[in-house]
Amino acid sequence: MNDISLSRRRLLFSTAPVAALGAAQAIGLAGCAKEPATSDKRTYAPTFFTAKEWMFIHAAVDRLIPPDAAGPSAVEAGVPQFIDRQLEAPYGHGAYFYMQGPFLTDLPPTLGYQLRYTPRELYRSGIASADAACTQTAGKVFAALTPDAQDRFLSALEHNKVILSGPPAAAFFAQLLQNTREGYFADPLYGGNHDMGGWKMIGFPGARADFTDWIDQAGKAYPLGPVAIDGARS
Amino acid sequence: MAIRKKPVDAVIVGYGWTGAIMAKALTDAGLNVVALERGPARDTSPDFEYPRIADELKYGIRGDLWQPLAKETVTVRHGIDDVAAPYRRYGSFVLGNGVGGAGAHWNGQLWRASPEDLRLKSHIQERYGKGFIPAGMTIQDYPVSWDELEPHFDHFEKVCGVSGTAGNLRGEIQAGGNPFEGPRSDEFPTPPLPAIYSAELFSKAAAELGYKAFPLPAANSSIAYTNPYGVRMGPCNLCGYCERFGCFLYSKASPQTTILPILAKRANLEVRTNSYVTRILRDSSGKRATGVLYIDEHGREVEQPADMVVLCAFQMHNVRLLLLSGIGAPYDPNTGEGLVGKNFAYQMCSLVPTFFNEDVQINPFIGAGAAGQRVIDEFNSDHFDHADAGFIGGSLIYAGGTGGRPIDQTMIPSGTPHWGSEWKTAVRKFYLHAAPIGTQGSVMSYRDSYLSLDPTYKDAVGLPLLRITFDWHDNEYRMAAYCAAKMQEIVRAMKPAHQDLLLMRPGDHWDTRVYQSTHTTGGAIMGHHPRDSVINRYSQSWDVPNLFVMGASAFPQNMGYNPTGLLAGLAYFAAAKIRDTYLKSPAPLVDA
């Protein structure tokens, strides 16, 4: 029961508008000694994302992995925090990618990513132009749309059915979906996969990495829950 | 002016598998050796320690052990008239970096070639006639035979503690092994691990159809084991962090777990890490290497003089260094002239994502890079009659995942949305009950598939990137379709709830975004004569006889097997000849 109430609280928090976010943060700070399990997430203040971008990210990732009976939503899992932290890390600055020009356009997509955007630039420009597109067609930013309308817009991004003033819609969407999955399933040490909820949903035992006693029990259900790199169990 | 180091007897470029093999052989012979490695020092402790190694994001996705593409990548184009674009993010293949090279984070699938793979052109012409090889296909024989390589295959398997079951022991076919393998002089050094569940289901289905499934030869030791150099390995526990990770259990063979421990204290070996070789130096005749130029960890240019240069970098980097150094004539696909860069090849893989009902517990997270997997070899190499098949080559068909890494290895049935509640529901429903069954197929060499220097893009120090010109050919589409049909038949006999098929079809181009195989080959191929090859049978340059080139750059075309067993066999074969003949009288080892 306790788990359910915790997750419901997270759910309520997750849909709160950004004005309430500040209030929740203050409460979280005051109450952090009582609720260590959730305090990190509730008090997390983004470094890379602006307040407007933070609203977009919360709304978008919670449609990509929405709240339902199958398992935690992306926001419940801490995916926004994960993405913010990744964008502050060398990864966000493009340190893992070859970033020298010239940047050729009109190449076959099979030759892979050819944009000049680092992940940070892709988010900055992608969110701004996505919100501009939503405002132009619906009079509201993405985060203020109904969930159905959000889904329709995300689907349009995914299939390049909307022209953004920034990056190609599908490239922005692919980056967002990849990082959302990463935040949902990566070890909790990166700020996502809260309480190993992503792993529990599918039955992945995390960093357990020792199946000596299951080598000769092929076909039997594995009984143990996940462990994280820091030793946390669930 | 470059800093000039004290001359040494031999300099080794790249400290992965072949670098370790050659460093041991040359220091055994008493030479003073310097090994230059572009990446950092790496060892089981502290770099691969548990639990920090069990981190999918860091190693499996970001690729912390891979070559940083920001500094150097390759460019890719499909056709000889196209403009190439940089491989900016990892996708189709992953490149190694640091001590151990790709040998630190490989899967450990350790195959020998089939005997006919080593004389492919002659074999095909003898069995099917000269007209069977299509126009534009440029396959050729290796200049070395199965019998010559077999002792070296056997030795390397013992170095690696390979687990498996012999299928052909000195000509006698053995139950439970690969009946198509060439005759081996000895059993595998360690027994196979039991099949993981998907591999068990696959083996039973294959048997029903009359095929002989056997344990995939695994450089994942199944028991506590001491190799011929006295280095101890521990048993694999199917941890699921193998492919793309270093092994924390000393089970997966890598240079670190098999050879480097005995080299660590040798006074006649110095390993310099973070040393990026940019050129092979030669004297005024152009026929003799005098050492190499490299950029050290402080960014300084350093000259390392040496009497002998041994290229042991990855296949692509060996070729790039030859091109950057102006050694040998670059291959020209328009004229067919020149040899450096010729016959680049790859592999073509297919996959059947297989989904079972909830009562079938696949437990995908229980697995290793190779151990626990099962495979059939009926449709690989020339193990079946190709007369009516209309292609050359084939695929192995295997079962058993390398792990269940949730970011990268979750499978959902085709047609399922990639996000939203439907995605979530499908991932939750199938994660524990899905298995990958796959093929790994050969790719022949062609006149229009080659490596050259890119005219536009540069690495971090301003040198041209290597350019890959490659796309699929009709022979490979036919090969893949044929083998995929056999695979689908086996999967149907496994009685899954649902099965999909990922297959390259005619018209599909090489997609660099999707991981397929890191088994790239060719570009510095070996042969009988300098008119058809860059190196001779002892991996010695025809043009510069004190230069040796190791690795899969030597393969005249690619096979359906993983390359490490063959390239290690070729390295040991070369090392023996260097020790017995070359060092006593440094000269060309084969008359041109």
Image (cartoon, rainbow, N blue to C red):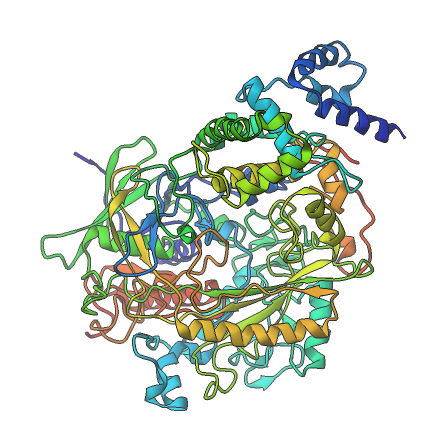
Residue A178 image-quadrant placement: top right
Q: Nearer the viewer, residue A191 or B107?
A: A191
| Residue B38 spot, x, y in % from top left | 37, 43
Q: Nearer the viewer, residue A63 or A79?
A: A63
| Residue B96 spot, x, y in % from top left | 44, 48
Residue at 61% across, 37% down: A180
Image vertical order of residue B341 relative to residue A131, above or below: below
Residue at 26% across, 65% down: B584
Look at the image and tell me whether residue A210 can be seen. no
Which residue lies most toward the left here? Answer: B284
Q: Nearer the viewer, residue B324 or A122?
A: A122
Image vertical order of residue B144 relative to residue B450, above or below: below
Image side of residue B85 versus residue B462, left or right = right
| Residue B82 spot, x, y in % from top left | 28, 56
Count every numbered label the image shows and give the total. Answer: 0
| Residue B480 spot, x, y in % from top left | 50, 72
Image side of residue B433 versus residue A116, left or right = right
Quadrant, the C terminus of chain B: bottom left
Quadrant, the N terminus of chain B: top left
Image side of residue B358 versus residue B521, left or right = right
Image vertical order of residue A229 relative to residue A108, above or below: above
Look at the image and tell me whether residue B492 can be seen. yes
Which residue lies most toward the right here? Answer: A1
Q: Nearer the viewer, residue B451 or B428?
A: B428
